């Protein structure tokens, strides 16, 4: 198994530092990722990540909730997944992929033996004549790199020296499986085929998979449920705010692309907003939507307007916002902030060209070309020992939705909490309203007339 040379790892880390001068090469996991600034961290920082831990959640249903592969020996390659073949970087392959005996000795990969190594994707799949590029969408050189062991480590792929798909935490079970990982991308304006491959690997790794060693580390097999390759699209989380530079999100999750997390895709889709709108409150010039942005549908607020509701600015409540979720609906993307505690929030919503965090004043380096800021009043602080805001700024990766690419929820500051909704393209019509039983604040971003 080839060792990742110190200079190679340093080069990867320095690539991140070049994107954002505030990145600490020795300690930082990732910089903030805001598309308009094109400053995103990727795989280079995976060896030294210090973000929140990824839980290893293995259910009785086995890998990905499906059938648990039955081993035929020390290890078995799951036949219901697509298996990619990697050779040690810098070493001549022992034999062409197509000539490798599928009955060769297999062993589950361990985090300890993979740490500090790098591998290069080969042309063919395991036990298949299908070229890897037919699935990934690109024949650019793809390197699989492993950093430190454990939940503070990481690993991932670098495609064509530009696109990245990095996994938070290097944690494998006894069969070499990784489950429901947090995956990051970099979005640095890569060539179309590289962007397509980055999209592919991001989606594939998010579904979990298995790592298997062939022989005496002659090959490394990566088994994933390969998604269909779509046309390349920009995709879009991650260190706690520092005393200088810009802020980034520390908590992370990925939004579902089919519903808003309540179990029924449209159970909140017909609710009428309870908020009202008012003219812009700031002296900044209004943001005019281009012709490509749909006109505001009934009940939606035009992008240049400010929306307030719930008795804004209100105050005196003791509400908490433990979870944020998002989903795609017919004609709009939906973000839902679940609320607990006492009282009802007031809110103010408006697009901003300069999103900043209350208290610190640091820039909110959220992904997206446009950012909708929603400020909730009437928020309280959790009881001692509560884990509600332990992650600090919580980031939700929503790149699978129609327009919204990332959502941030901040901890409360002086009774108010901020929600940032980053999206592709120009500002879009939106609406904000409350739903009851259970109490939740809903933000809809219009995606079609």
Image (tube, grey):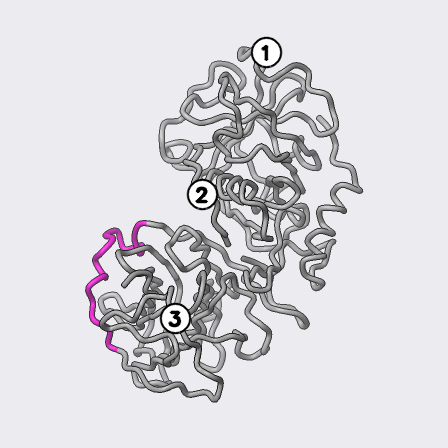
Secondary element at tag 2: loop
User: In this orientation, does residue 378 appear?
Assistant: no
Q: Is 154 placed above or below 281 here? A: above
Which residue shows up at 69% across the image and 27% down it? 88
Q: Residue 289 colored magenta?
A: no
Give the mark toward the camera: 3 or 1. Answer: 1
Q: Residue furthest front?
A: 291
Most foreground residue, 133 or 406 = 133
Residue 273, x across and y down, in percent: 24, 73
Residue lying farthest to the right in this orientation: 7
The x, y position of residue 431, in whole percent, is 31, 72
Residue drawn at point x = 55 percent, y = 69 percent = 364
Q: Which residues are magenta?
A: 258-274
Q: Is residue 109 left or right of residue 328?
A: right
Q: Nearer the viewer, mark 2 or mark 3?
A: 2
Task: State the residue position of label 1.
Answer: 99
């Amino acid at each position: 198994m080839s060792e990742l040379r110190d200079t190679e790892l340093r080069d990867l880390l320095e690539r991140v530092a070049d994107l954002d001068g505030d990145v600490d090469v020795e300690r930082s996991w990732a910089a903030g990722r805001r598309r308009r600034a094109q400053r995103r961290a990727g795989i280079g920082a995976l060896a030294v990540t210090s973000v929140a831990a990824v839980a290893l959640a293995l259910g009785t249903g086995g890998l990905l909730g499906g059938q648990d592969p039955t081993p035929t020996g020390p290890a078995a390659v799951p036949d219901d997944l697509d298996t990619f073949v990697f050779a040690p970087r810098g070493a001549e392959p022992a034999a062409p992929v197509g000539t490798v005996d599928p009955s060769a000795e297999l062993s589950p990969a361990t985090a300890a033996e993979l740490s500090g190594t790098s591998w290069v994707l080969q042309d063919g799949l395991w036990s298949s004549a299908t070229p890897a590029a037919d699935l990934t969408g690109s024949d650019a050189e793809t390197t699989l790199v492993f950093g430190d062991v454990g939940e503070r480590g990481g690993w991932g792929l670098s495609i064509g020296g530009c696109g990245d798909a990095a996994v938070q935490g290097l944690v494998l079970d006894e069969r070499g499986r990784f489950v429901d990982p947090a995956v990051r991308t970099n979005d640095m304006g890569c060539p179309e085929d590289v962007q397509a491959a980055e999209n592919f690997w991001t989606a594939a790794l998010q579904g979990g998979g298995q790592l298997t060693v062939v022989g005496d580390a002659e090959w490394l097999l990566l088994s994933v449920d390969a998604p269909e390759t779509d046309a390349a699209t920009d995709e879009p989380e991650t260190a706690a705010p520092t005393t200088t530079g810009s802020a980034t999100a520390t908590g992370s999750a990925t939004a579902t692309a089919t519903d808003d997390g309540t179990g029924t895709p449209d159970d909140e889709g017909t609710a009428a907003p309870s908020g009202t709108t008012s003219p812009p409150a700031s002296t900044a010039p209004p943001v005019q939507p281009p012709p490509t942005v749909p006109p505001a549908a009934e009940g939606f607020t035009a992008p240049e307007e400010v929306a307030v509701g719930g008795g804004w600015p209100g105050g005196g409540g003791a509400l908490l916002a433990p979870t944020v979720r998002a989903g795609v609906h017919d004609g709009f993307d939906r973000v839902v902030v679940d609320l607990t505690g006492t009282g009802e929030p007031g809110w103010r919503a408006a697009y901003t060209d300069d999103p900043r965090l209350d208290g610190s004043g640091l820039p909110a380096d959220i992904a997206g070309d446009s950012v909708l800021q929603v400020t909730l009043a009437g928020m309280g602080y959790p009881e001692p020992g509560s884990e509600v805001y332990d992650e600090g700024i919580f980031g939700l990766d929503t790149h699978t939705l129609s327009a919204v690419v990332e959502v941030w929820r901040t901890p409360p500051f002086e009774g108010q909490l901020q929600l940032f909704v980053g999206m592709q393209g120009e500002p879009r019509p939106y609406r904000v309203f409350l739903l009851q039983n259970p109490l939740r604040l809903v933000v809809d971003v219009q995606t079609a007339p």
